């Protein structure tokens, strides 16, 4: 064989080897709206693998703001980089689309391997057969290390269906300077003081607002109305006194109107937009206070702003409404063990603290609160109290339907297509309690 032919043979062999090697490495997928991260070499059986071949691709779908999703993507890539043979595709779904998209995916058998669900959705997804229990991967110590209120949300029918990731209490954030100018020494402490703040500070024609509430947020609405009217606190009755609730709610949302006309409400509670930011207005003193969450406050914290709990409807009950999310695993995935190992790494206290530093969403694990910098946060005692007082809806498959119905009623109210009386009547009729379910 001539030298020229020998060289040609060597080059062919080298080219074929490179092609085979590239196929073993795998090609990143597009992942729909998300992105594929962390591609590693195949042929090595990773720890905790469900597959004998070792090469595994898992899909994770979440609904996060861009900053949090960037952190999640980076953590996903780090995990894949540290475990050979694992490819992770991450997808971020807009909050308004997440529930419908994930439910439809479950119905047609195409659910992602891992989903970060609102805790209020977990039982419905479990009851529909979309999830698989995670208790076998979850020791008693690991369960006890998480906030019990959140753990109770992911338990149903004797099984655990999710791993709580975080918690976000609803609070009042108030502008101390604005309050002092109106001779208000502290945040509202009773339903009557909520009405006083609204009536005294609300002058939308001058760009001044009382206690601001996102008019389309059902969770914020529940937090406010439970304090103002006692609604949502009874296990079998939505509104304690519908007539009294209508009067108080109308007086809070539109104190300028003697009877509800609906015209003042959207002016009193404008929706956030690129041209109008509630947080900027609150910092300037144009808004007196705001019903919001701890994470939102921490992201927007300013010198003149302070936090307080939302007032109690009566002295016997002081609920603090909590939002939370949990990692869940699809019932159809063959990678349950791999996913649980991944979830464990993403939810250890040290990792939760890294997430807290960036997102300011409080962690679900109790030991995380003993770690810096959360341990040294100026509001750490307040966080502890808020979580201890925490209230959530009892787990029920009907919850997503109830909350979607409330969101629809709030939108109609804000658009002037309904009244406070109609909202109370419609939610009272449409809200399904677990004891009433068939």
Image (tube, rainbow, N blue to C red):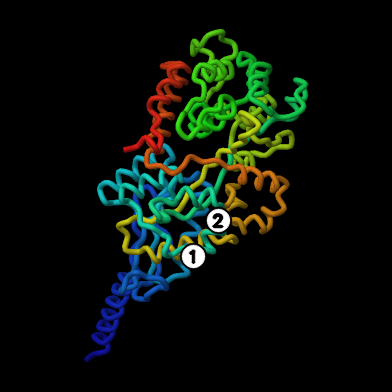
Give x and y (percent) for residue 1: 22, 91
Residue drawn at 51 percent across, 17 percent down: 246
Give x and y (percent) for residue 410: 45, 25
Up the image or down, 339 lies above or below 237; here it is below
In the rendered image, is residue 208 in sight?
A: no
Sequence-earlier tag: 1 or 2: 1
Up the image or down, 182 lies above or below 113; here it is above
Local SS, label 1: loop
Local SS, label 2: loop
Determine which residue is flagged by label 1. Answer: 139
Judging depth in this view, the residue of 131 and 177 nearest the camera is 131
Up the image or down, 134 lies above or below 103; here it is below
The disc label shown at residue 146, or none: 2
The residue at the far bottom in this view is 1
Judging depth in this view, the residue of 220 and 14 nearest the camera is 220
**Neighbour class for label 2 at 10 Å: few (<14), some, many (≥20)?**
many
The disc label shown at residue 123, or none: none
Residue drawn at 46 percent across, 67 percent down: 81
């Amino acid at each position: 064989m001539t030298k020229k032919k020998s060289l040609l043979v060597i080059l062919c062999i080298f080219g074929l080897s490179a092609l085979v090697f590239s196929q073993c490495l795998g090609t990143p997928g597009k992942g729909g709206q998300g992105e594929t991260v962390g591609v590693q070499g195949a042929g090595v059986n990773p720890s905790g693998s469900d597959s004998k071949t070792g090469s595994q691709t898992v899909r994770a779908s979440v609904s996060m703001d861009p900053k949090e999703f960037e952190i999640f993507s980076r953590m996903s890539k780090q995990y894949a980089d540290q475990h050979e043979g694992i490819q992770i595709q991450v997808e971020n779904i807009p909050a308004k689309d997440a529930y419908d998209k994930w439910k439809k995916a479950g119905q047609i058998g195409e659910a992602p391997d891992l989903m970060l669900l609102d805790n209020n959705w977990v039982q419905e997804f479990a009851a529909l057969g979309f999830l698989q229990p995670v208790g076998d991967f979850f020791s008693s110590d690991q369960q006890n290390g998480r906030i019990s209120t959140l753990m109770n949300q992911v338990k149903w029918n004797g099984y655990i269906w999710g791993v709580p990731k975080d918690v976000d209490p609803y609070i009042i954030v108030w502008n101390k300077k604005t309050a002092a100018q109106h001779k208000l020494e502290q945040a509202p402490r009773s339903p009557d003081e909520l009405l006083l703040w609204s009536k005294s500070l609300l002058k939308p024609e001058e760009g001044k607002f009382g206690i601001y509430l996102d008019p389309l947020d059902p969770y914020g609405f529940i937090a406010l109305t439970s304090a103002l009217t006692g609604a949502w606190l009874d296990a079998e009755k939505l509104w304690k006194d519908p007539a009294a609730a209508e009067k108080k709610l109308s007086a809070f949302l539109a104190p300028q109107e003697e009877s509800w006309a609906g015209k003042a409400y959207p002016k009193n509670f404008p929706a956030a937009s690129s041209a109008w930011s509630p947080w900027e207005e609150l910092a300037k003193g144009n808004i007196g206070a705001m019903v919001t969450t701890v994470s939102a406050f921490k992201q927007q914290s300013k010198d003149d702003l302070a936090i307080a709990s939302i007032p109690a409807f009566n002295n016997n009950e002081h609920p603090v409404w909590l939002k939370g999310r949990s990692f869940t695993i699809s019932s159809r995935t063959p990678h349950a063990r791999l996913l649980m190992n991944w979830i464990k790494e993403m939810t250890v206290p040290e990792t939760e603290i890294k997430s807290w530093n960036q997102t300011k969403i409080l962690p679900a694990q109790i030991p995380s609160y003993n770690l810096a910098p959360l341990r040294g946060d100026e509001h750490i005692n307040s966080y502890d109290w808020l979580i201890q007082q925490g209230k959530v809806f009892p787990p029920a498959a009907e919850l997503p339907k109830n909350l979607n119905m409330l969101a629809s009623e709030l939108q109609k109210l804000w658009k002037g297509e309904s009244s406070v009386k109609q909202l109370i009547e419609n939610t009272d009729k449409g809200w399904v309690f677990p004891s009433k379910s068939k």
